Image: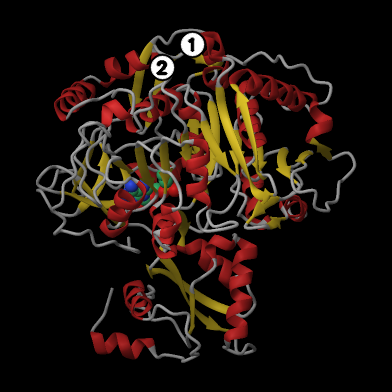
């Protein structure tokens, strides 16, 4: 186990920010209004999780009630056993039945800005219902059935949400692939999921140019023959090839479809979706989430963490991409269930200008804003003048997710965006946890910049040693969750052993998150970093071994080692050390070639920030790459540099007396 990208948390951080006194008034009331209430609820919920979660689940619509709330046989959890429920029904139909059919469910803003401003679309719950039903019927007409895994590879358009909900409606688990991933990444995921249907777009707008999504799918299809149908949404009108028999335009597919489509009554434990994420090995893992528990957990966390108050003219905006878990849980499922409009923005934060996000907040009177520390650091760099140009007074809750937030970025967010009157919720969670696990509650929890504070209701998080003993304040250890929670992963698709090894073997009987952490004197959690070979680049998870395999798949590279290095904006950048085949020249040209090669194999997010060429990688006597040494070297030389020095690492290592 290595401690790649370990973030030293700031032990000296002493500033405490109490929830603003007028918060409840500005935000239309508060669900959890004080620390006393939080403590009481937390204690009771952890003591009797079944009672707690059962009561919340009763707020949703079930076709058939559950017979017991929890069946736990570590590592296997079943929540709401035998209950029958549909995710789309609870996100759409339920709200229509409650009388909210004509209210906005989804607000969307496109990236291009024409003379009359950007394109904006608003879908009410009723309109969303009709679109979802038509598309669900379209999928059925292609032969998609309950249980078939449907791959979705689209840009951030309303049809992405429509496609996700349509799959949920007919009981076909979706596997959304982030639009920034490459053809090779699509092929791997399609093969692993044995997916026969892909939904894509001709292209996606990104910073004024078109990302050729359909062409990437075509390329991926060369290395897999699982796919029978590709549905293509026209968005950018870029030139594309259509393969007769296989490819169908979205518009043709829905043309004659009815706008009624019954919801499949799914078992609580039927798979709702697969989402691939990076782990310690080169192969991304398909994290499986099921229906009932996931809905209950995302419903409650959305409501309490953000203090969403239906009927208060709230507009909630999460800037993540639906291709990541944050988008699944907190653009779509958790938010729609809460009857607060969810805003989706198609493009880049700095297109056409660096004030685009603040213009959106102002234009749509956004009340809840959820983003990643990496974005905040970029805004800091671009300058305060951009947010200052806009009226941000509608904001009442700010959130962050994806990586530890450095106190400087926290303070900037608080001051420049929140005008010192918006609580910041620093939410710790993972693809595997499905929903928030450790987070402040905006009206209750005093915040300390850089700490994700305290466990959510019903969550029994702890910092322990390998034997599972809780550590003393300020001692670093393993971050675990001791009791099951409703939205926990149910497995890794097709790899039972990896599921057990990764999450339930490090500390007996407990879920191990892969992060190290400590708790301070107040009991607040401070995330220190990943303990496996995963790095967090701009809040996106990447396995160092994935990048290494991409590098060695190029003829020039004999051996590669990839480590994280500090990066001003990304939090962690990617440093690659490569030894080359003698036929290749170690120069800048090759650096560019290799960076492009990694982009082709994985996606642009995985491009190394620094590539160093070396005769040989430093290794221990037993042949293990000395990653700590590489991390030190990478941390010392932040620039990509133009030097092609071939360093004799073993000499450095022996000088320093390193032996990992
Ligand atoms: C990191 C994203 C510190 C952590 C929802 C975790 C965080 C990994 C925070 C999961 C936070 C996420 N503070 N670290 N508030 N949120 N992380 O699966 O290392 O993309 O294990 O899920 O991101 O990343 P994932």
Please tell me which residue is depicted at 60% across the width and 60% down the height of the picture: 603
Label 2 CA crowd tier, 10 Å (few <14, some 14–19, many 20+) = many
Residue 277 vertical position relative to residue 407 in the rendered view, above or below: above
Can I make out residue 390 in this image? Answer: yes
| For residue 659, side relative to residue 646 (left or right) | left
Left or right, 616 with respect to 11, comes to right
Q: How is the image coloured?
A: secondary structure
Position of residue 427 in the picture relative to residue 114 (left or right): left
**Residue 344, percent from left and from top:** 56, 39
> In x, y percent, where is residue 463?
20, 45
Q: Secondary structure at mark 1?
A: loop
Q: Which residue is mark 2?
A: 80
In the drawing, what numbered circle is on residue 251? none
Query: Is the C-beta separation of discs 2 and 1 under 8 Å?
Result: yes
Which is more toward the observer, 75 or 30?
30
Marks 2/1: CA distance? 10 Å
Residue at (50, 26) in percent of width and height: 336
Toward the viewer: 608 or 548? 608
Name the spot of residue 436 as percent of width and height, x first.
35, 36
SS class of the residue under badge 2?
A: strand
Is 502 rendered above or below residue 229?
Answer: below
Q: Earlier in the sequence, mark 2 or mark 1?
A: 1
According to the picture, the residue beneath numbered tag 1 turns out to be 62
| Residue drawn where x is 66% and y is 21% of the image | 127
Number of labelled discs?
2
Quarter that holds the N terminus: bottom left
Q: Position of residue 447 (x, y in %)?
A: 21, 43
């Amino acid at each position: 186990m290595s401690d790649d990208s370990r973030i030293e948390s700031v032990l000296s951080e002493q500033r405490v920010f109490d929830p603003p006194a007028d918060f409840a008034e500005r935000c239309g009331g508060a669900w959890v209004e004080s620390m006393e209430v939080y403590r009481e609820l937390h204690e009771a919920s952890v003591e009797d999780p079944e009672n707690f979660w059962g009561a919340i689940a009763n707020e949703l619509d079930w076709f058939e009630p559950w017979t017991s709330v929890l069946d736990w046989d570590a590592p296997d959890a079943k929540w709401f056993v035998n209950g029958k429920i549909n995710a789309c029904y609870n996100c759409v139909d339920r709200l229509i039945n409650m009388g909210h059919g004509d209210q906005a469910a989804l607000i969307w803003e496109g990236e291009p800005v024409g003379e009359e401003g950007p394109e904006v679309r608003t879908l009410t719950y009723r309109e969303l219902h009709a679109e979802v039903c038509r598309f669900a019927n379209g999928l059925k007409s292609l032969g998609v059935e309950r249980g078939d895994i449907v791959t979705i590879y689209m840009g951030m358009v309303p049809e992405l949400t429509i496609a996700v909900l349509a799959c949920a409606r007919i009981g076909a688990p979706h596997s959304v692939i982030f639009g920034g991933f490459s053809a090779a990444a699509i092929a791997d995921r399609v093969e692993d999921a044995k997916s026969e249907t892909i939904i894509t777009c001709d292209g996606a707008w990104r910073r004024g140019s078109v990302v050729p999504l359909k062409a990437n799918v075509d390329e991926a299809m060369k290395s897999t023959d699982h796919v029978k149908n590709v549905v293509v949404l026209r968005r950018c009108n870029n030139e594309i090839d259509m393969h007769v028999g296989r490819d169908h335009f979205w518009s043709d597919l829905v043309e004659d479809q009815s706008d009624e489509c019954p919801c499949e009554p799914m078992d609580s434990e039927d798979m709702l979706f697969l989402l691939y994420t990076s782990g310690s090995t080169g192969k991304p893992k398909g994290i499986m989430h099921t229906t009932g528990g996931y809905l209950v957990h995302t419903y409650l966390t959305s409501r309490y963490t953000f203090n969403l108050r239906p009927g208060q003219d709230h507009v909630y905006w999460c800037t993540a991409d639906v291709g990541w878990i944050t988008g699944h849980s907190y653009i779509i499922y958790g938010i729609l269930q809460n009857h607060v409009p969810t805003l989706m923005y198609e493009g880049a934060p700095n297109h056409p200008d660096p004030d685009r996000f603040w213009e959106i907040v102002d234009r749509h009177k956004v009340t809840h804003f959820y983003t990643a520390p990496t974005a905040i650091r970029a805004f800091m760099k671009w300058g305060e003048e951009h947010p200052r140009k806009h009226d941000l007074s509608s904001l009442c809750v700010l959130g962050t997710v994806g990586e530890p937030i450095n106190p400087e970025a926290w303070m900037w967010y608080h001051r420049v965006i929140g005008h010192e009157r918006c609580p910041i919720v620093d939410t710790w969670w993972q693809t595997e946890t499905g929903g928030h696990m450790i987070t402040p509650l905006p009206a209750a929890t005093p915040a300390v910049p850089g700490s994700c504070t305290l466990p959510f209701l019903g969550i029994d998080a702890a910092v322990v040693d390998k034997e599972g003993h809780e550590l003393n304040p300020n001692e670093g250890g393993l971050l675990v969750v001791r009791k099951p929670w409703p939205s926990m992963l149910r497995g890794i698709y097709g790899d039972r052993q990896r599921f057990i090894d990764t999450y339930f073997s490090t500390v007996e009987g407990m879920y191990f998150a892969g992060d190290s952490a400590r708790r301070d004197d107040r009991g607040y959690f401070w995330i220190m970093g990943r303990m496996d070979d995963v790095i967090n680049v701009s809040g996106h998870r990447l396995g160092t071994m994935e990048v290494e395999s991409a590098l060695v798949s190029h003829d020039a590279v004999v051996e590669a080692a990839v480590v994280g290095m500090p990066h001003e904006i990304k939090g962690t950048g990617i440093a690659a050390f490569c030894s080359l085949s003698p036929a290749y020249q170690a120069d800048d040209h090759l650096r560019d070639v290799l960076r492009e090669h990694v982009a082709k194999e994985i996606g642009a997010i995985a491009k190394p920030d620094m590539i160093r060429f070396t005769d040989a990688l430093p290794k221990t006597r037993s042949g293990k790459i000395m990653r700590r040494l590489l991390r030190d070297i990478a941390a010392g030389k932040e620039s990509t540099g133009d030097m092609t020095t071939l360093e004799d690492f073993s000499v450095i290592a022996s000088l320093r007396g390193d032996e990992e």
